[in-house]
Amino acid sequence: MTEHAEAADRAAVADLTGRVALVAGATRGAGRAMAVELGRAGALVYVTGRTTRERVSEVGRATETIEQTAELVTAAGGTGIAVPTDHLEPAQVKALTERIDREQGRLDVLVNSLWGGDRLIEFDTKWWDADLDKGLRMFRLGIDSHVITSHYALPLLIRRPGALLVEITDGTAAFNRTYRDNLCFDLTKNAPHRIAFGLAKEVKEYGGTVVSLTPGFLRSEEMLDHFGVTEETWRDAVAQEPHFAIAESPALIARALAALAADPAKERWSGRSLSSGELAKAYDFTDTDGSRPDAFGYFEEVVFGGKDGTAADYR
């Protein structure tokens, strides 16, 4: 890492001392990174998911657990509390929010980063030839879980002005005007934009903010494994997938969340569809290598728009 990148790293930390957050779906990827960054900023973070040291979810990645995430939150400077929770089970989510209320009496940030359905997507398959059960399961994992969690958490969240609810998705509302090549995946990843738009109206009178937020081309643990690379060697994957040159680490969306949560004027964003790259510009932070990748600008203008350029022009 260069001296410039190290300086950018240090400058990225917000101050969320005394805040209480719930990151629903914090086992890996963006969810884990966001939980850790909130901890780095001083927050107490409840982290939930279905994979624990005793039990593995249907995603099947046993080496990533919510206990690990909680430990990383604490090591970063916050307080991490792991609570095994299946967010498709209303009774479990109700018990979770009651516990947070009992133990903390407040909730300042709720992040719905629930998904786990990548393995269900059948690209290049007409809907009538696709597996119906897989499609309906995507709805459960990426829509129902979000709605159930918000239903139980919002009464606690809106108790204090300045609360923030973030709906994590894949693709901005503008980018998702392009069909995502699988009907149920397309619907599932567009739903958080409408959830954020609607709930922003409902919480406005309580001084709350609701947004949808997406990473760009995310270098999640699963994506790195897919290409057979690590975070240190990720550029080797560009030979397999040239567009991976625009990829960003999970730290970028994590820093976006922390900056947004710490912003006293964040309500100006309410109801909007946001990206990690957009907030990196607005709040002046970078990825871990000191770059500021604009994945959606690259895809919209170069890949789909035919403009001359490379990923390097958008970092």
Image (tube, rainbow, N blue to C red):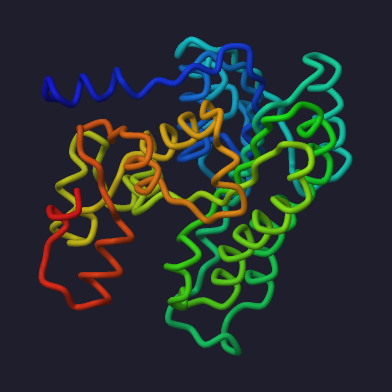
In which image quadrant can residue 240 be found?
A: bottom left
Q: Position of residue 296 (x, y in %)?
A: 33, 60
Residue drawn at point x = 46 percent, y = 60 percent: 172
Q: Is residue 76 left or right of residue 160?
A: left
> Which residue is painted at 45% across and 14% down in the image?
76
Q: Quadrant of residue 4?
A: top left
Viewer-proximal residue among 189 and 290: 290
> Tag count in the figure?
0
Q: Position of residue 293 (x, y in %)?
A: 26, 47
Name the quarter where the N terminus is drawn.
top left
11 or 241, which is in the foreground?
11
Of the pair 164 and 31, the residue shown nearer to us: 164
Where does residue 70 sit, x and y in percent of width and height?
Answer: 57, 20
Image point (32%, 42%), residue name: 281
Left/right of residue 255 with respect to residue 136 in the rendered view: left
Could you tell me if residue 63 is visible in this image? no
On screen, residue 85 versus residue 69, left or right, reads: right
| 287 vs 105: above or below | below
Residue 296 vertical placement versus 13 (above, below): below
- On screen, 201 above or below 131? above
Snapshot quadrant of residue 158: top right
Q: Position of residue 66 (x, y in %)?
A: 59, 28
Residue 116 appears anywhere in the view:
yes
Q: Nearer the viewer, residue 306 or 29?
A: 306
Tell me what residue is drawn at x 86 percent, y 31 percent.
95
